[in-house]
Amino acid sequence: MRQRTFTMLKPDAFKRRLSGKILARFEERGLKIVAIKTMIISEDLAKQHYGEHSDKPFFNDLVEYITSGPVLAMVIEADDVISQIRKMVGATNPKEADIGTIRGDFALETGRNIIHASDSEESAAREIGLFFNESEICEYTLPDEDLIYE
Ligand code: IDP
Ligand code: MG
């Protein structure tokens, strides 16, 4: 069964006009985008999304950062997609992220690390539910799925 994950280009990525380059990486690898939208996240949604970090010293800055402009929120579907996208995203601190990862190639600071990706099946289900209605998620088949999957 293919998996779904929640991925979000943060306001710095969107404002730096990196969306196309980052989406191209997902598309070229054969991952299927099943939902995508731009939005400005409310403070309430930001606090829910990052609820696990509410006790951290950076929490207020994180909420301010993620609500500071448009994000590009998406649901991506593929085999093992949660762990594959985390690998493509790279370490939380871009200075420690491998070159070739999205953070390693496009970012320098933890507080400006340009992209979010769910870290487990549980968080993917929770985050998809926070950002998307079922009716916004598109079921379809890629025309080259038999070339991507054996
Ligand atoms: P992740 O995004 O790689 O899953 P988490 O530890 O879940 O990393 O942290 C969520 C987000 O909070 C990070 O992507 C980053 O934007 C921010 N963050 C995490 N640690 C710090 C920090 O030490 N200073 C500032 N921001 C941080
Ligand atoms: Mg996280």
Image (spheres, rainbow, N blue to C red):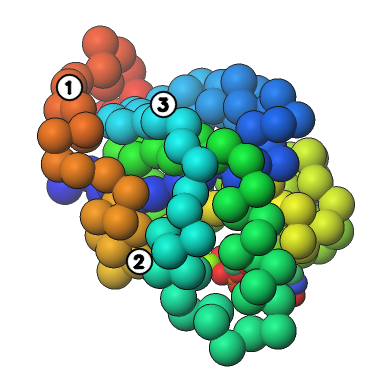
Q: CA distance from mark 2 to mark 1?
A: 24 Å
Name the residue: 40% across, 68% down: 48
Name the residue: 79% across, 40% down: 105
Q: Residues within 10 Å of mark 1 (few under 14, many from 20)?
A: few
Q: Residues within 10 Å of mark 3 (few under 14, many from 20)?
A: some
Q: Secondary structure at mark 3?
A: loop
Q: Secondary structure at mark 1?
A: loop
- Residue 112: give x, y in percent of width and height: 76, 53
Q: CA distance from mark 3 to mark 2?
A: 23 Å
Q: Which residue is mark 2?
A: 123
- Residue 102: give x, y in percent of width and height: 68, 42
Look at label 1 and name its amino acid.
Answer: Tyr
Is any atom of residue 17 visible in this view? yes
Give the vertical position of 146 relative to 133 (above or below). Answer: above
1 or 3: tag closer to the N-terminus: 3
Look at label 3 and name its amino acid.
Answer: Gly
Name the residue: 26% across, 17% down: 142
Give the vertical position of 6 relative to 142 (above or below). Answer: below
Q: Is 28 in front, or is 33?
A: 33
The label nearer to you, 1 versus 3, is: 1
- Residue 93: give x, y in percent of width and height: 76, 63
